[in-house]
Amino acid sequence: MAKIQVEQEPGQATYQSILEHEITEGLREIERPTYGLLISGVSAGLDVSISLFLIVVVKTLGQDAINRAVVEMLGGVMYSVGFIVVILGRSELFTEHTTRAVYPVLHGRATMLRMLRLWGLIYVANLAGTAVLARLITLVGPALGVTRTSLFGEVARRVVDHPWWVIFLSATLAGWLMGLVSWLVSAARDTTSQILIVAIITGSIGIAHLHHAIVGSVEVLSGIFAKQGLGMNDYFRVLLWTTLGNAAGGVFFVALFKYSHATRAAAEPPQINLSEEAASTIITDLSARAPGSAGELRKPSRSTQREGADPMGT
């Protein structure tokens, strides 16, 4: 019996190599000291909040001059800016880096308690960073004349004015997409590819107005600080359901499925077993393709078809 081995495309990351990278990075994050996680988490909260400021600037400048659909598309582009800064800068962001921390637990390299410690520290630090920048942009933006105060309320209302189950399911989709960001960035070969991946996926979250716990935090807080009729009860309600939804989407739809798929994939490229005659026929047909031609494979003769019809020779 002849064996034809299906080779991995050169330079393409395998599921196993991506998983190894995710486990290694997840362990590195889990083992970081508390002080380092808090500083990195606050930085991520500040960085990702840049997205809201840019979105409101675009809405302010284009509200009366540009078609609404164009403004929404540009808003999606601006939404991705904060995530690009956070992810390429390797700051600790809830949903993106916390999904990665699940892999070492699934692989038996870390405990659930250590993972929850990481989640808690990053979550609190992210929220602290968003609170600081939400207050800053609601003061500076209107003073500079680049943002309208009413638009902070408009953005916040779009986050708040939904039933709890809509917020939860929307956040689940956002958590799933953010978990995919981590996986795909690990598979990317260069920085340009990583930027494109982050921009496309997080921009899609922004255009679709899916709920993200950390970005949603700065959106609602800015509406509160701008005195647009929202209260802390709106903030905590949205925060609860977005957090649960983001965690569910990242853990169950990405971490569990990707881990299961990677660990159950073949350790070696799959092999296809063929009889010697059938293998010889395929090789002969492949060699008959003319170089540079549009080329169809040469149709085997009737006798060859009869000989290769039964690979087992029965």
Image (tube, rainbow, N blue to C red):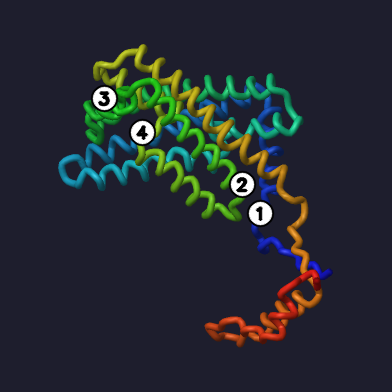
Query: Where is 145 relative to 12, above or below?
Result: above
Q: Residue furthest left?
A: 64
Quadrant where the N terminus lies?
Answer: bottom right
Give the mark toward the camera: 1 or 3.
Answer: 1
Q: Badge 3 is on which residue?
A: 153
Q: Amino acid at mark 4?
A: Leu
Disc number placed over residue 13 in the picture, else none:
1
For marks 1 and 2, give the CA distance: 9 Å
Q: Secondary structure at mark 2?
A: helix
Relative to residue 145, is residue 252 drawn left or right? Answer: right
**Separation (CA) of disc 1 from disc 3:** 44 Å
Q: In this rendering, does residue 222 appear at all?
A: no
Residue located at (64% from left, 31% from top): 101
Q: Are marks 1 and 2 in contact (CB under 8 Å)?
A: yes
Label annotation for residue 186? 2
Mark 3 lies on a secondary structure that is helix
Q: Earlier in the sequence, mark 1 or mark 2?
A: 1
Q: Nearer the viewer, mark 4 or mark 2?
A: 2
User: Residue at the spot x=34%, y=27% of the render?
Assistant: 159
Estimate the spatial distance between the alpha carbons at disc 3 and disc 4, rounded to whole Å: 12 Å
Q: Earlier in the sequence, mark 1 or mark 3?
A: 1
Q: Position of residue 69 (x, y in %)?
A: 25, 45
Which label was assigned to residue 185?
none
* Residue type of the residue flagged with mark 3: Gly
Of labels 4 and 2, earlier in sequence is 4
Q: Could you tell which of marks 3 and 4 lies nearer the N-terminus? A: 4
- What residue is disc 4 on? 52
Q: Secondary structure at mark 4?
A: helix
Residue neighbourhood size for the residue with mark 4, other residues' Cα within 10 Å, grouped as few (<14), some (14–19), many (≥20)? many
